[in-house]
Image (tube, coloured by chain):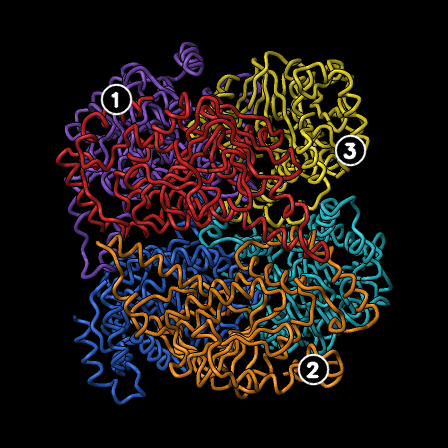
Chain colours: A orange, B blue, C cyan, D purple, E red, F yellow
Amino acid sequence: MMFRAMAAAVIGSAFRKSRGLWLPGLSAVRAMSAQAGPTPPFSALSVSHPATAVTHVELYRPEKRNAMNQAFWSEMVDCFSQIALDSECRVVIVSGAGKIFTSGIDLMDMAENMLQPEGDDVARMSWNMRRLVAKFQETFSIIEKCPKPVVVAVHGACVGGGVDLITACDIRLCTQDAWFQVKEVDIGLAADVGTLQRLPKVIGSRSLVNELALTARKLYSDEAKSCGLVSRVFPDKESMMAGALELAAEIAARSPVAVQGTKINLVYSRDHSVSESLDYMATWNMSMLQTQDLVKSAQAAMEKKSPKEVLFSKL
Amino acid sequence: MMFRAMAAAVIGSAFRKSRGLWLPGLSAVRAMSAQAGPTPPFSALSVSHPATAVTHVELYRPEKRNAMNQAFWSEMVDCFSQIALDSECRVVIVSGAGKIFTSGIDLMDMAENMLQPEGDDVARMSWNMRRLVAKFQETFSIIEKCPKPVVVAVHGACVGGGVDLITACDIRLCTQDAWFQVKEVDIGLAADVGTLQRLPKVIGSRSLVNELALTARKLYSDEAKSCGLVSRVFPDKESMMAGALELAAEIAARSPVAVQGTKINLVYSRDHSVSESLDYMATWNMSMLQTQDLVKSAQAAMEKKSPKEVLFSKL
Amino acid sequence: MMFRAMAAAVIGSAFRKSRGLWLPGLSAVRAMSAQAGPTPPFSALSVSHPATAVTHVELYRPEKRNAMNQAFWSEMVDCFSQIALDSECRVVIVSGAGKIFTSGIDLMDMAENMLQPEGDDVARMSWNMRRLVAKFQETFSIIEKCPKPVVVAVHGACVGGGVDLITACDIRLCTQDAWFQVKEVDIGLAADVGTLQRLPKVIGSRSLVNELALTARKLYSDEAKSCGLVSRVFPDKESMMAGALELAAEIAARSPVAVQGTKINLVYSRDHSVSESLDYMATWNMSMLQTQDLVKSAQAAMEKKSPKEVLFSKL
Amino acid sequence: MMFRAMAAAVIGSAFRKSRGLWLPGLSAVRAMSAQAGPTPPFSALSVSHPATAVTHVELYRPEKRNAMNQAFWSEMVDCFSQIALDSECRVVIVSGAGKIFTSGIDLMDMAENMLQPEGDDVARMSWNMRRLVAKFQETFSIIEKCPKPVVVAVHGACVGGGVDLITACDIRLCTQDAWFQVKEVDIGLAADVGTLQRLPKVIGSRSLVNELALTARKLYSDEAKSCGLVSRVFPDKESMMAGALELAAEIAARSPVAVQGTKINLVYSRDHSVSESLDYMATWNMSMLQTQDLVKSAQAAMEKKSPKEVLFSKL
Amino acid sequence: MMFRAMAAAVIGSAFRKSRGLWLPGLSAVRAMSAQAGPTPPFSALSVSHPATAVTHVELYRPEKRNAMNQAFWSEMVDCFSQIALDSECRVVIVSGAGKIFTSGIDLMDMAENMLQPEGDDVARMSWNMRRLVAKFQETFSIIEKCPKPVVVAVHGACVGGGVDLITACDIRLCTQDAWFQVKEVDIGLAADVGTLQRLPKVIGSRSLVNELALTARKLYSDEAKSCGLVSRVFPDKESMMAGALELAAEIAARSPVAVQGTKINLVYSRDHSVSESLDYMATWNMSMLQTQDLVKSAQAAMEKKSPKEVLFSKL
Amino acid sequence: MMFRAMAAAVIGSAFRKSRGLWLPGLSAVRAMSAQAGPTPPFSALSVSHPATAVTHVELYRPEKRNAMNQAFWSEMVDCFSQIALDSECRVVIVSGAGKIFTSGIDLMDMAENMLQPEGDDVARMSWNMRRLVAKFQETFSIIEKCPKPVVVAVHGACVGGGVDLITACDIRLCTQDAWFQVKEVDIGLAADVGTLQRLPKVIGSRSLVNELALTARKLYSDEAKSCGLVSRVFPDKESMMAGALELAAEIAARSPVAVQGTKINLVYSRDHSVSESLDYMATWNMSMLQTQDLVKSAQAAMEKKSPKEVLFSKL
């Protein structure tokens, strides 16, 4: 709430007159929700660049409620592998085209794989199944391994695999009408592509995590906000996309050395003790502090300039 | 098989007229709070089966405010060891008989052990004390090792050992008049049967955890809800027990392969890094996905049936 | 809220008539905010003892908004090393003198170190930079290693290094007008003295942590309370200092064996699995339960006395 | 070699004249190899006490080459659970009756369990199989959890499950004619009751471990000695049993507080980092150093007496 | 020694009359050392199949002493990624063409990358350097991730990157004239593609590891054998290749479910505690024990047949 | 710079005529064993510089068989803290003055601390004891934290605390007449300053480790060599000191960036999984590879020069 006011004020002044880089105008937001279709070579994703240094990845199978089909699983890996290496990109927004974010796994398309694993005996079918699950897991872990922060914007439903996806993102936003459902238990399996691993580290109530995972009940936006799953709720998709773009622009405006180092170390510290994480951090920053970005930023700070007025090299 | 029969019966009566929930009838709830006494061979616990596939474990020393005496500590282990192996049981509810959930450790009964450890010198007394503490710890760890989800329903006071107990359960509910107290510091010791180890992983505010553990102040139900210790607050014990039973029925209706695999992997992921937990999950599911439950559930999902209409084999 | 009422009641009755030890009177609170200057040999800290067994460490460079200069970094280590060994002290309060808690690192004073690392080549400059960062990290880790609980009371701004500092404390309080800012990304670096390592383990919303660290936006007191960063918000600094003193007195009144064992095991369990932490706890308590404090406290409990009426030996 | 000389010398002097406690005479050794049969209630184990404070556990199915049948797996747990609590016992010797140490798992007896797991589908059969494997694992982990040191003496063949067993013991001895075989790969499975987990931590050549586990080739006594699997090789079973008894007597003669604390901390340090293990050790010894054994032993040392002349309390 | 005798005996009998699968005849060995050149699309590797189910990967830049150039680093990843998925392959042999195994990194070819990292400032050059090192590390980690066992056969020199490579293999063999050198310290860097991480876990003397890594002294074959780096030494390359092939044939003849499960669990247990590794093993084998290979192998064992006479399905 | 001068001088004299080693002259070795006494401010240590960039730390209480008294424990910390920061020093040799390396802890001097811990009750005595043990542990951990490699040269006896000390060093040498004894169990305690934590990670036979720690038997030099505790055995102290100096000179001649980075990463990898260690290594080397040392060394390598001819900056 207060952030949006502040952001609005900033946009109203410094942003507009600057070199056009950081301002996500209304047209950009509209462009975001007016994609014509998937971006080749992708068939389930639409990738665009609504503002400088911002990449927008849209789940794009609106007619199938963005259900995750076989193409989706491999395209995500290709897409985020490219983004990880794209020095033009500093931040990513993920959202869904059409009426909802995603209905989760496309059971029709995937059933063959899931229900009829290959192999001459149980061991061999298990072996192939494990490889398959590991491949699916990688689809979302790739988001975490990408050093650029990923903001995910959810509207309508976010079901099953959708929860696996969003818990691997860095910042979660949603609309008032959004709801989340750890659906897997309803189709007879324990969620295995990330939800059970990441959700408990993403929100602060273990009782709630267990309840969601064991009963498949829906979590609505207000509870999603109060439990910390999302950090902001917007009245509708348009305002959410505008908010996501503002937020992305805030991040994109800062030193990529600082931003990406922050993400990498935040992911590291989730999985290590504080003392191990401090050691890693010191080893990381022993070189990263020698960046010109620090000199430029410190100088700007002393001159009371915004970091947005600083020009940083690519990373 | 028996579950199906039960489910049909239940659905045929109370359930249908309610708001679509798998509603356990009022009589079941009343039965829960009308136990006649401990269930032999137990002297401090009363075990019943208020609904098919649901086991109810009641702390049953109401005249002693369910204080945890020597019998309690060993009976819990026996009780949950049996439940772990009971293929008729798919979910457990824990609550307390009488006016409060529990006043914690029974100082009178336990003082002998705690205050007069055996042994010829400090080392030997310490050795025996460590064995004793480890035994007490196992009393609650057994809840966590039991693969069936455990819902705990707290009314009135939940003090000292009570907090150790509930943090080892999976889902926590309470009444409006409930309060929680990490009492140990008041009797001169650091809480050593689970609270200091599990509470910080159960709620999201470390400042609050520290405050509770260092000052022994009471935490009332509203704050317990907002900090995530409990996921739901009910107006009184009767409505809470009905709610617990509904929740338990929701869980019991689902595939036990999915439900118990979910619990085991949620406990695992709490104590491991995300990548280790994903690896374990894939290794777990390589066989568990070959369950018939998945086929049945997926089919039901495609036919728009509820998972509750599916009949699952015992586990 | 309820705690303060309770605390007030307690103060109104048992506290006043006791041996004067535990009552932090108004004069004590006033004294806390009326320091004349830094306490030699310190130049950036003012250390006092507003109540028995309570040590107050005040950041004392009000004219510089308590910016963290070179002296500060080494004085903190000296100060907390002494406190760790001071058997008169059972609890610590940290606050800031003047208008705000702290503006973070003193860029003017530190720039030389940070921007011009010594060394003949990149490797050697990195080597020296790593040593420097490790030294800064130790400044706040020393708070965590000190076995006495540390309550931090924040008013006004808490920026950059200030967030690193408070996340290493045990209990966080703030005033209504307080705000927090993970500022580092704005000056071109990933926060490297604790924030990225501790903040995610201190509050329950990872989305919020990421947002704060990646955008450097301000977090105001209401959100700080709802996300669990602070456990209480006070209308102004005076009431906060009174509250901090009450809280400190509560802690100081309890067995130091229990209190310090609690802190040590809470820090341990943050960084280890539950089963490892239980094992450590049992090994810890095998001797600590042989304290006279347990006998005294248990006896007091049976006699319905407050632990505050018990006299404990020094630790 | 040098140890035996030393031990012999010691036996020749101080030992014989002492209170008879520590000298394992020839009769004791003979008694060890002349058991009449299993000791009730055991059917696969023979338990005796060849010297004071020494317990001898003999695999006793000589006519079946000590193959591990169903009875064996559960009797080991019962046996070592008792030993762990038996304050008369300070050290354990494990050996095999008859012509060889053990031929490993009794395929005939176990096949039913292993080859026909119960369950209605793959998931349920897997579930039951996992429980079974975990139970088998516990059979040998119980040796590790027993705080008394366990010396294992191997003659002839030690195959399959035998290797799992001996790697869970503390000290390994063998005869010249002994050989070891990680047999599991030959019967179509990865060794799952400890060999793959413990063998690499027991010997120093990973290339050798891999070769043994992947080819099921035999490892003869000379190579077993040079790679460190055993610490001593004896010409025949009689001399080995005498050696084992001497070694056991050495251990039994020392402070049980020191000996058992040593075992517990050695097992701990295998699985933790050095700094974690040091922390655990300090927490362990903070009480254990207050033992009277230390005073007695230090005094004896100053008086140039052997620790064997010191009388220690039971533990 | 004894193994070769045994292997020879086996080859002399059962092997020859079998379906020709398992016998690596002399011609196969000769074929191994008579490659005509790299196998397209590879330019630095020659891949062949000297016996059924055995893949031979030869470092093939003999004129450059098999120095590791840019092509090598990426071809290894491609090669082992294919092998991991090739169900025809059950075991891999790695060796070097020409006079020595490898002289390590090709300084001429790599200098550009190593000495002139791209980037506008130190941070950006470091960023790119880290990515490069990680890529090089993956080159050898891919060997470890490949579930098929890898036998490496070293003749002549094995320098620098060569040591990184062989420590990621499972079984190490060498010729009498082989020597090993951790060369990196001589060219001004700490070895960063695996030696410092794996060597200490591969051999049993930490003093020796440190000496080798800190002085770059040569380790000759006899010391390599006695310290456990290699498990066998052969008089010359031809006999070593014959031995490697025999060993590979032994492994290839066994159940791939057993063999590959063994490798995966051995790698897992290196990096986890014993209790974690046991848990993982039980979860792995709950399905893998349901393999037909177990039935076939157990039956063969009861009929006193060799596992080599059993026909296993592909994996 | 100064190192270059030194190196030139050394090379110009004694070195060239030897077998190509960087041979420190006989006079240097004699100087090492002819100290006049402890070096102020130390009373139990003698510190000298027998060759450029080499620091020699001698345990210097020959009349007390270098028993470790109170002064020793704190002087070690001071001494190695200085060495860690001394850019003139690149490698350290530790040895003992007089007839033996060390007889271990000075029972007479230490008994007061160990046997009479301060404190009003068991808990408080334990508290103080833990602090004391932690302080003793730090005495040897400081060796490990010092980034300069430490070579320890043992002659005669190395008993009790001596084993704790040498296992914290990097390279271990000994004389033919040396013996080692984990003595603690003989005086009634589990070794608590490092032996139980480091010895199992230093040598490759766990059976041997357990035997040594549980029986306090002596380990003579030949077995110390074969089990890997020491990497070289010398006929007498004079030749050992010459060997230590040669070895130290080898290390001192190499890039300190490479050498110290190697030590730090070797210590790191002991306590972490391979994948964690590789990640740390890449993060370490992303800056360290930008050293001028690499350019200089690579150039020298191409010109077939020895690294000893290269002049490196201080670190």
Res. A6 mark: 2
E72 lies left or right of C40:
left
B141 lies left or right of E165:
left
Q: Which of the 4 quarters of the picture holds residue D70?
A: top left
Badge 1 is on which residue? D32
A251 lies left or right of F269:
right
Q: Are marks 2 and 1 in contact (CB under 8 Å)?
A: no
Amino acid type assigned to the residue bearing label 3 in the image? Glu
The location of residue A243, given as percent across then percent down, is 60, 82
Cα–Cα span, label 2 and label 3: 54 Å
The location of residue B135, given as percent across then percent down, is 39, 50
In the image, is residue E163 above or below residue B196? Answer: above
In which quadrant of the rendered image does the N terminus of chain D lie? top left
Amino acid type assigned to the residue bearing label 1 in the image? Met
In this view, the residue in front, F217 or B264, is B264
Q: Is residue B104 visible?
A: no
The single residue placed furthest to the front in the displayed view is E36
Q: Nearer the viewer, mark 3 or mark 1?
A: 3
Q: Work out whether disc 2 and disc 1 sit on a shared chain.
A: no
The residue shown at (40%, 28%) is E231
Badge 3 is on which residue? F88
